[in-house]
Amino acid sequence: MPEIILNNVAKRFGKFVAVDNLNLHIESNSFITLLGPSGCGKTTTLRMIAGLETPTEGSISIDDKVVFDADRGINLPPNKRDVGFLFQNYALWPHMTVYQNIAFGLENLKWKKQDIRDRVSELLKMLRIEPFEKRYPAELSGGQQQRVAIARTLAPGPKVLFMDEPLSNLDAKLRMEMRTELKRLHRDTDSTFVYVTHDQLEAMTLSTNVCIMENGVLQQFAPPLVMYNNPANLFVADFMGNPTMNFIDGHLGVDGRLTFGGMTAMFGHSGEYLGERDVVVGIRPEYIHVGEGDLKATVYSTLPSGMETTVKLDVKGTSLTAVVFGDLDYAVDSEVSFSFHKAAVLFDKADGKNIAKGQLLSPAMGG
Amino acid sequence: MQQVRTGNLTMNRLRGRVKAWLSKPANIILLVFLVTLTALTLYPLLSMLVETVTIHTGREARASKLAAGTLSLYHFERLFATSENQYSWIQFYEPFLNTLLVSLSSSVIAILFGGVVAFLVTRTNLKYKKFVSAVFTFPYIMPAWTLALFWETFFKNVNIGLKTSNGIMASVFGVYAPEWFVYGAFPIALVLGLHYAPFAYILIGGILRNMDANLEEAATILKTSRPRIIWKITLPIVKPAMLSTFLLVFASSMSAYSVPVFLGSPVRYYVLSTKMKSLMDSYPGQAYIIVGVMILFGVGILLLNQKVTNSRKQFTTVTGKSGQISKINLGKANRPVAILLVIILLMVAVVPLVTFALESVIIKAGDYSLSNMTLDFWIGTALDKRLDQGDSTGILLNPKVWNALIFSLSLAVTCAIVAGTCGILVGYGVAKRRGSRLASWVNSLSFFPYLMPALAFGAIYLAMSSQIPWLRGFLLLALVGSVKYLPFASRSGVNAMLQLSGEIEEAAVITGVPWWKRMVRVIFPIQKSSFLSGYLLPMVSCMRELSLFVLLVPTSNTILTTMLMQYSEKGWAQFGNAINLLIIIVVLLVNFTVNKLTGASIDKGVGG
Amino acid sequence: MKKLLSLVLAAMLVLCCIPALADVAADVEAGQAMTHDELVEKALAESGTFVVYGNTSRIATAAEAFAALYGIPTEANNLKDQEIYTKLRNETGAGAASMVMIQDGAQLTDAIDEGLVINFVPASVKDKLDEKDQQPALVHQYINKLFIYNNLGDDVPAIRNVWELTDPAMKDRVIFKNPESEKVNMNFLVMCTKPEWSDKLAAAYEAWKGEPIDLGEYQNAGYKWIAEFLDNVTFGKSDTTIAEEVSQETAAGKIGLFVLSKLRSSSVLTDNLTVAQYDATAEGYEVNPFSGFMYPMYTMVNTKASRPYTGMLFIEYLMSQEGFQPWGKSIGAYSPNAEIAVNEGDLTIDVWKATTVMEDADYILENFEVEDFILLHCQK
């Protein structure tokens, strides 16, 4: 039941800061996603926890055991950390058969011949790749290679499993399928998963907690739905969700009246008094209901996908994206009415931080 | 109390960092190579620099009127600024210009010839491709001067050079070649160009073979004409490879000694290397200045090369994803082009071998009738009584030849193993820590021996070994050979390692596979053929090396090449030709055996 | 980085214990006074490999016979003179030669001054040799390079006067080794400028042209001859190739300056060659003023010899009738020991001494700038 704790971990390459002052508490048995655009430090973080990269500062412990501490000069090698690592390009050894690929690590751990045999068979069965036992990696499809890589990683029964964008090389259909299997695998193996991806959908669907990073700095660490509904800042809000959240520049008056994109509304929330300031109003597309309410907009374009339709609206020059569920479509340039539902998030215009989550009450045109 | 704690803290942190740094084998490897290569390459360089400002006993002391051992710029003044008897012009400036001309032309010839053939083989439906690619590396396997010797004996005639005898071209075909064609800058550049063309073929061919065909296809879609595609797309992509070839060929041509001697001296055409050799006799200070100039030039081109390839890196991205490369259909031109190419290759690669075979069985030079032929020089006995010349038995029955062959082979194999293994390790270290200053230092140091002229390299090592009593004989030869040929191995090692994604090794690190086992069980097997080629190239070069070893061999019949030289000096041409042929056959045999057994070949050695 | 370097250097220093040099000089001094038997006894008492260097290929034959005679395994090594000097300078310990056979008196003088080699004169030959052949270095043999021409065709260059070689009609018909590549050739040309020879050359010029020499800007007749001679010369790679090439049937009209001993080579068509001096002698003339040049081959003990007494014994052997045999069996090599007769068909050493230019190390060393003049005329 391992938990992973990162304390003030930093990694610098010369002057370049890859990861800065990172604190993370990864609970046992969780499925954590490190999410962010490329170059944000997520892979570096993963590799530091695994021991493939040495942090410049801080300490890391896995399962109550300190595996790295810059101050105390502790640094356990990867193989002493009891972890598994699934690589982006699978890193299957091309000169070994599927069987040898899976067994190589076990031989190295001095397992008995028969135990190795049994364990490999078990994994081959579990990942449904038994027929390929004698094949070489080059003779397998991408999906099959992926399964072999997973089997190889799982073979020694690691308590923690690290995955570095493992699905990015698969086609869309296969990726979908593997996601389900990974989630199942997480349940079956009873271990802690740390997963790196730049795909927010993957992070949303798979993880128990998402850790989103930008330029080496942790932006928010929270369960995916919390993050979706109450993002810590503009960056997180923008990164999570597809289509992305609508951001409209606005002004919050002394009286709590919000002026934004040619509309006005009262901002109702349960928190402290916010005062007068410039803000960015964040509204999720699905909270804009088209075809009801008092607000008016022109349809700029529509993207019907069957299950839902993404509608681009033009409100007096401000562009809004809305999602309408069902197989509806609208004529381009026609006028429609719309209304805001559920939550909107206010971000400080100056630093982009989430200042409050609340409701847009009695919105109206003009202002 | 507080202070003590902070002190401990910093100590711990430092210890932790050092431990972490040392726990990476790549760091240890780089460190070890930094130290040894500094000792083995920079130290000789420094001691050479000291020689250029030291007055040596004998003529230098007498001419400069300075005591031996004095430090002085006398050599520089004499070599660069002596107008009396046009000394500086004769000893330095003119040979320097000649060297530039010859080295530049040979580089251009090598790039053109090797590049065009590489293009024909990889990008067109040329006929006889198999033969072309099999034979193309022959000229490199043969010592360069054998081609020069062949050129002279084939084209010489009574109108040129010594004007004493006719070669095959004149006596059999009645064609009398003009002097510029047989002696001087043109044939020197041509022979060196042909000798080093395999470098261009290997380097440029490697890029062309792996080049993403989409790049060309994209241009085809945009209705670009074929020549324009080659000019605007293909050429820029192979430009880095062309520059690498330029560096290799230029540096080698500059220090080539025997080819200019054979083809230049009859018409009094001198280059820096020939001047260096003759100055080494009486004015070593000036000779070492010339060596320094050559090295400076090499380093200059190396830096230029690095600069250009770095800024052009985006061009070299090789994905290898694209499927079928569309091959140009040569159409009606195919057969004539192929036949022309085959004829050229026969001329430079096969005819010399036949000539050597022929020259090794005739008794009186120039008489090719059957009655003048004998196999005595190969398998005869009691020859000294019958021929009053040479050894008493043919070379195949001569134990001295067999001893030399065994010594040469064990030397070549040892150098190959040492250089090849070090090359892999350097490749591993450099690739793992790529971008770090340590890695680029080691990378440059491991290439440096290539820029040192072999003769000077040997001389410096002889001087160095005089300080170290146990560094003698085989050990000394093996050390010098390994260092001198490390550049080949390290290049192929770095290339092979760069092609290998780091994850391949990390996947084994995670399960705790120890470093040596990762090297032996994972990394080596995957890049086997590239690595083996890194062994093959030093081995081939070692087998046919002369200048590097000539000062260091314990006795002149220790290795085949010095034995060959001794026989040629004595004028035992038949024995000389027979041994020459023996060397080439042994090298070809080793090459083919390794190729058949493992799939490795020289082609992959210098690797794209 | 710096630290590392100094560490390495320190490590190297530790490894390089400087071998204690046996006092070879004292041994040689003692050896000069020893009888043959005493030398043998001392030599047999020495251990280790016995190595010798020589820039004559026949040293191997002599070494084999020596090894058989005394049961001392001998490694003979045929090197170019410059390689021998380089090795003498740099080699120490068991692998280094104990004695050398070497040419180029000028460089040898420097090598003696530098303490690289020591002269050893065996007691057995001391009385049989001229003083000049004993000091400062023991001469083992003289070797001559002569004007030898192809005797075919109508335009046979049967020269009687070396000035004939400077005639414009001889352009590209004279073949010589590049003086830069073998020092004895350079020495010969330098010697031509010594007053002794330049005077003779001036006289020869007058004999040839019938008028006194007009030196122009040349310092003396030697310079003029060198310049005009080299202007007509083409350079051959080695004496062997020159001999072979001049002997070709297609080489009518050509003349070479190369070692007489090459006439023993089976690859040389000897019948097509005539030695200018022999020809002249037959007609009662001589080649005016010289028929070529002659230089000594010396034997010396290496100062760093690991087997100095064996080296001395080998020198004694080489100076004997038996030891000279490998060279003495054919023409072109002459022992300074008057008791060793020349080959049949060859002329005696006294004739050659009188008709060829001989090295004078002191003159060559003092007039090194003549070499620059020669180099200038080795240009196109």
Image (cartoon, rainbow, N blue to C red):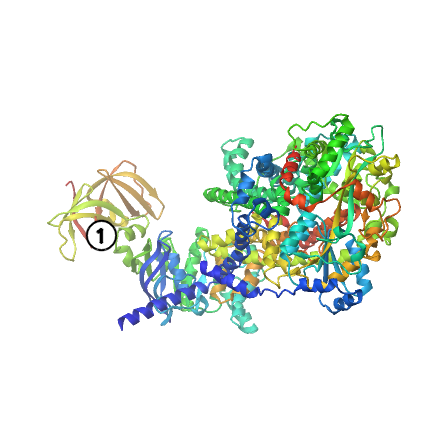
Amino acid found under the numbered disc labelled 1: Val
Residue A181 placed where, x, y %?
43, 61
Structural crowding at the residue carrying mark 1, measured as other residues with C-alpha within 10 Å and reported as few (<14), some (14–19) or many (≥20): many
Q: Quadrant of the C terminus of chain A?
A: top left
Residue B103 lies in what quarter of the image?
A: top right
Is C54 situated above or below B159? below
Q: Helix or strand or loop: what does disc 1 sit on?
A: strand
Q: Taking the image as drawn, is residue B458 in sight?
A: yes
Q: Is B266 left or right of C243, judged from the image as shown?
A: left
Q: Taking the image as drawn, is residue C318 in sight?
A: no
Question: Which residue is more in the foreground, A211 or A7?
Answer: A7
Question: Which residue is more in the foreground, C89 or B241?
Answer: C89
Residue B199 placed where, x, y %?
60, 44
Residue C248 lies in what quarter of the image?
A: top right
Q: Is B536 left or right of B510, judged from the image as shown?
A: right
Is C359 situated above or below A28? above
Question: Which residue is more in the foreground, A262 or C206?
Answer: C206
Q: Quadrant of the N terminus of chain A?
A: bottom left
Residue beneath disc 1: A345
Residue A163 lies in what quarter of the image?
A: bottom left
Residue A364 placed where, x, y %?
16, 44
